[in-house]
Image: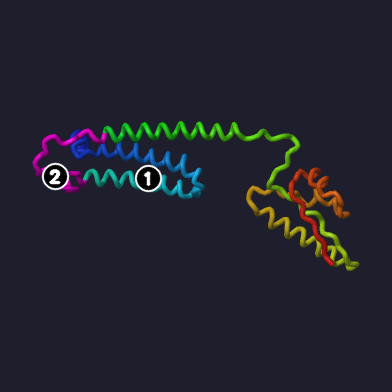
C-alpha cells in the first residue's frame, strides 16, 4: 500500500512540485531578506512573506495531487489521465527552474553576507570618548518661588518626564539619583553631559 502511495505521488508530480516550490520559496525569502532592507521596507513585510510561503507549501502539494497542467490548461488529474499524451512534451522543464532558482538563491545569500560584512567593516570604530547618540539626562528642576510645595511639584515633574522617557525604545535615560548633584543649575552643560555620558540635557524650572 505504501509503495502504491509513493508511486502515485510520483505519477502526480507531487515530488516535482514540492522541490520546485521549496526552491522558489527560498528564492523569494532571500530576495525579501536581502533586498527589502535596502528599500526600507518594514521587517513585518518580510516576516509576512515567509509565513505565506510556509502556509502555501501544503496547499501547493494538495493542488499538485488534485490537478495537472496540460496543453489545454489546468485539468483534474483524473481527466488529464484520460487525455492522449502529447508528443515532444517537455517533462524536465521543472529541473531547469530548480537549478536557476537555486543558483540565484545561493548568489543572493552570499551577496547578503558580503554586503553585511562590508557595512560592518565600513563603520568607524567607536572611541572611548564617544557618547551614545540616543541618550538624555533630566536635571532637577529649579524652584524659582519661595513656596516649599513647589519643590515637591518640581520633583514630580522630573519623575514624570523620566518615566515617559524610559518607555522610549533604544533611549538611554540617566537615573534621577545620578543627576541630583547638579541641582544647583550648572552653567557648563557640556561638562555635565560628559560626566553623565549623554548627548542631550534637559533642564527647567517651576515658579
Residue in the picture at 27% in, 43% down: 61
Query: Whole-Å distance between the Cαs marked 1 and 2?
Result: 28 Å
Magenta-colored span = 66-94
Say if 23 sits above or below 151 in the image.
above
* Secondary structure type for disc 2: helix
Q: What's the mark number on residue 53?
A: 1
Quarter of the N terminus within the rendering: top left
Q: What's the mark number on residue 80?
A: 2
Residue 149 appears left or right of 81? right
Residue in the picture at 46% in, 49% down: 45
- Magenta stretch containing residue 63, yes or no? no
Residue 161 appears left or right of 16? right
* Secondary structure type for disc 1: helix
Quarter of the C terminus within the rendering: bottom right
Residue 29 appears left or right of 144? left
Residue in the picture at 76% in, 37% down: 129
Amino acid at each position: 500500500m505504501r509503495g502504491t502511495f509513493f508511486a502515485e505521488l510520483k505519477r502526480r508530480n507531487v515530488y516535482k512540485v514540492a522541490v520546485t516550490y521549496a526552491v522558489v520559496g527560498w528564492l523569494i525569502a532571500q530576495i525579501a531578506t536581502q533586498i527589502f532592507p535596502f528599500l526600507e521596507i518594514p521587517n513585518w513585510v518580510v516576516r509576512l512573506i515567509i509565513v505565506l510561503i510556509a502556509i502555501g507549501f501544503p496547499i501547493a502539494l494538495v493542488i499538485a495531487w488534485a490537478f495537472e497542467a496540460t496543453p489545454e490548461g489546468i485539468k483534474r488529474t483524473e481527466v488529464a489521465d484520460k487525455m492522449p499524451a502529447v508528443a515532444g512534451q517537455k517533462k524536465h522543464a521543472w529541473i531547469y527552474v530548480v537549478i536557476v532558482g537555486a543558483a540565484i538563491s545561493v548568489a543572493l545569500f552570499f551577496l547578503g553576507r558580503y554586503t553585511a560584512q562590508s557595512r560592518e567593516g565600513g563603520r568607524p570604530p567607536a572611541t572611548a570618548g564617544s557618547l551614545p547618540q540616543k541618550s538624555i539626562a533630566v536635571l532637577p528642576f529649579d524652584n524659582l518661588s519661595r513656596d516649599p510645595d513647589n519643590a515637591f511639584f518640581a520633583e514630580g515633574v522630573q519623575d514624570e518626564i523620566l518615566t515617559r522617557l524610559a518607555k522610549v525604545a533604544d533611549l538611554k535615560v540617566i537615573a534621577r539619583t545620578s543627576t541630583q548633584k547638579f541641582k544647583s543649575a550648572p552653567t557648563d552643560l557640556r561638562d555635565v553631559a560628559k560626566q553623565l555620558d549623554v548627548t542631550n540635557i534637559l533642564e527647567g524650572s517651576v515658579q
